[in-house]
Image: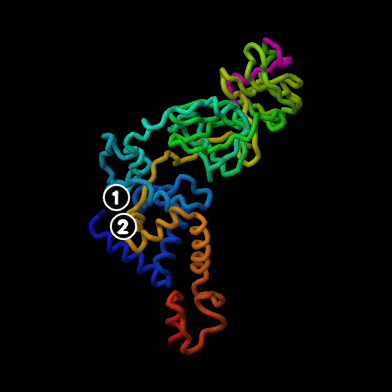
Amino acid sequence: RLKGWENLAQHIRDVFGRMGFSDKEAVVLISGGHVYGRCHTGSSGYAGAWVENPTIFSNEYAADMVGDKWIAVQHDTKMPDGGPVPEEVRPAPGKRQYIDLSKYMPEAGEEAARSAPDATQFPPGRYRCASQWVNCREQPETDSAIIGRFNQDQVLSLVSVKTFGTAVRGLAERGGWVSIVGSGGKNLFLREGDLEPQSLTGRYRSIVVAGSPFYASVTASEGAGRTKAGEEFCVGEVAFGQDGDLQGAILGKRVDPGDGQGSWVLLFSPASGISCELVVQGYNEKPRNPIVGQTGHQMMLVSDMVLLWDEGFRKHLEVYAEDEAALKADFGEAFQRLTELGCPWSNDLGSGEPSAGATFSAGGCPFLAAQAAQ
């Protein structure tokens, strides 16, 4: 803990207190605001989100604050592995902040205590996202670029499943890898059934440089030609290869004009992976690019850390770290109060115009109370 942090905690309490907010309301406003908010270069040299998924409202900020390990760093700090502070969260010279230490100090024996799961228990098929959200990566390795995210209850067709360390990962029909079982053993996707040919029909994009081969039939041993790289085409029927080089492959019958019309285009094969990705509205109408700034490293300013260090703040932070529903409800109420401070219809003002001698609750707006007392 940095010397004098108590003064910063009191400053936060004073700022929110001048607006009539309690410790609980201050914590919920900070926790909720940081989910969508970003740090700017002038604060520490870092510019980016506080949470890994800033696209949905969640308790990720509070949960990370309480659950992660944090280390104070400056621009030239050496990390436990002897390397520099990761560039994306490195403070500017003269600045200091905290970054997540979990990547450098995993729990003792954590990996050894778990054996590699059996991928045969998770065959290709249709899987439903069982977590609030799951990252989709360009490659199966955990340090691969994040190209998208899937939210709870979204259903994917995973055409290939493999074990990587203590995780089980699946290749989505629209491209990219997701964890069915995370490295920590948590089930992130639940299998709902086998691959359904009808769910795999639609518009596809060829993603291999040489174009995807197409065949006169699903039993053909030689290709009849290739699509163009990057070409999009429509598949009206899907079949699964049974013999020879096409065993285990997924092929789609092209129904629109173009090279290979009426032929069976190779969409996926166990040997080469996905050669054409399913185009899904709202996800990859244009080819996906890595999400900028999503490397897995997190940072917090000293003003964030005092929510952990101050007992009056921490007791509320711990509640929101465990209870997302409580965070949503309390944030909604507190944020409405914040946006309505000073408005005639605000609960802080009461009904009608204030009259001389009007009284306000302890949680009311002190600015209005002072105005009414004049």
Could you tell whether 154 is left or right of 306 in the image?
Answer: right
Look at the numbered disc 1 and give the secondary structure of its residue.
Answer: strand
Which quadrant of the figure has residue 310?
bottom left
Residue kind at label 2, given as amino acid type = Trp
CA–CA distance in space, label 1 to label 2: 17 Å
Look at the numbered disc 2 and give the secondary structure of its residue.
Answer: helix
Query: What crowding class fits label 1: few (fewer than 14 Cα within 10 Å), some (14-19), or many (20 or more)?
Result: many
The residue located at (31%, 57%) in the rendering is 309
Furthest toward the left, the residue is: 3
Judge whether residue 82 is colored magenta.
no
Residue kind at label 1, given as amino acid type = Arg
Q: Nearer the viewer, residue 247 or 145?
A: 247
The residue located at (60%, 20%) in the rendering is 269
Classify 246 as above or below 338: above
Q: Is residue 286 visible?
A: no
Residue annotated with mark 2: 309
Q: Position of residue 12 (x, y in %)?
A: 35, 64
The secondary structure that most of the magenta stretch takes on is loop
Could you tell whether 165 is left or right of 259 in the image?
Answer: left
Residue annotated with mark 1: 96
Badge nearest the viewer, 1 or 2: 2
The part of the chain drawn in magenta is 207-221
Could you tell whether 162 is left or right of 184 in the image?
Answer: right
